[in-house]
Amino acid sequence: MKQPHIQLDDTLGIRYAVLPGDPGRLDRIAQQLENVQELAYNREFRSLRGSYRGVDMLAISTGIGGSSAAIAMEELKNIGVTAMIRIGSCGALQENIALGDLIFACGAIRDEGTSRAYADIRYPAVPDTVLLRHCMDVSAERGWEHHVGIVHSHESFYIDTNDAESAHWSACGALGADMETAALFTAGRLRGIRTASILNNVVLWGKDTADAIGDYAGGEDRTAVGERREIAVALEALYRMSREEKR
């Protein structure tokens, strides 16, 4: 039976998925896959399947925010997916993070509503350590600039206290801000799903988020290079996990 939101069922038989937010990003993911087949497009959930180094992969967009990301995760679990990597964008919270740099989240500050609906705030939002290690190894082997640390997952770009909250979490050492990582880590851990989150920095620390995201959506620049790299890292990390699971 098809899942109500993602409109996919377990006949796919695919265990690994990459989760962009933007449905348009699937076009760039398809460029790094073979035998690509479009599957479904319902609401924010656009999906396709393809092959990476002989391993079947699923790509599905989750839209904006933790609630839709958690819906995708839950329904993907229902159809047999066991590992998934978010490939998203973020705004830097530290001055040393350049446009297009990758951030691998080793934990997330749960400053949004979805993860709190799943578990008490004392429950940690952390990735699968094996997936995180593979992401770090792939990026290091290819000589791609990356950072590993805590990210701040928040609820909205437009709250009145956004600047003050960003300054606070920057002072606490958070590397970047997104809206989905904490929900994915929390729900994934509770459901027994291996998760990781790769964020492509599209906003320099101290710059205007709305202007920078507009440039990112329409331009070919360092952030577009970062996007290609995060896709490549996610696919290779999932491939390496698949090899380990067959040993």
Image (cartoon, helix red, strand yellow):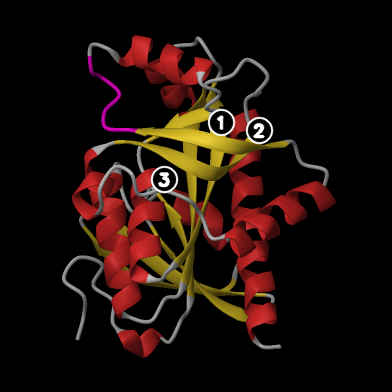
**Label 1–label 2 contact, CB within 8 A:** yes
The residue beneath circle 1 is 201
Q: Could you classify mark 1 by the number of other residues whose Cα lies within 10 Å: few (under 14), some (14-19), or many (20 or more)?
A: many
Q: Nearer the viewer, residue 90 or 168?
A: 168
Magenta stretch: includes residue 214: no
Q: CA distance from mark 1 to mark 2?
A: 6 Å
Q: Could you classify mark 3 by the number of other residues whose Cα lies within 10 Å: few (under 14), some (14-19), or many (20 or more)?
A: many
Magenta region, residue range: 154-159
Q: Nearer the viewer, mark 3 or mark 2?
A: 3
Which residue is outermost to the left? 4
Q: Is residue 61 above or below residue 106?
A: below
Q: Nearer the viewer, residue 58 or 28?
A: 58
| Image position, residue 214 (x, y; %) | 42, 24
Q: Amino acid at mark 1?
A: Asn
Q: Quadrant of residue 242?
A: bottom right
The residue beneath circle 2 is 101
| Image position, residue 147 (x, y; %) | 67, 36
Q: Amino acid at mark 2?
A: Asp
Q: State the count of labels.
A: 3
Circle 1 SS class: strand
Q: Earlier in the sequence, mark 3 or mark 2?
A: 2
The residue beneath circle 3 is 181
Q: CA distance from mark 1 to mark 3?
A: 14 Å
Assign the C terminus to one quadrant of the image: bottom right
Q: Quadrant of residue 59?
A: bottom left
| Image position, residue 179 (x, y; %) | 35, 37
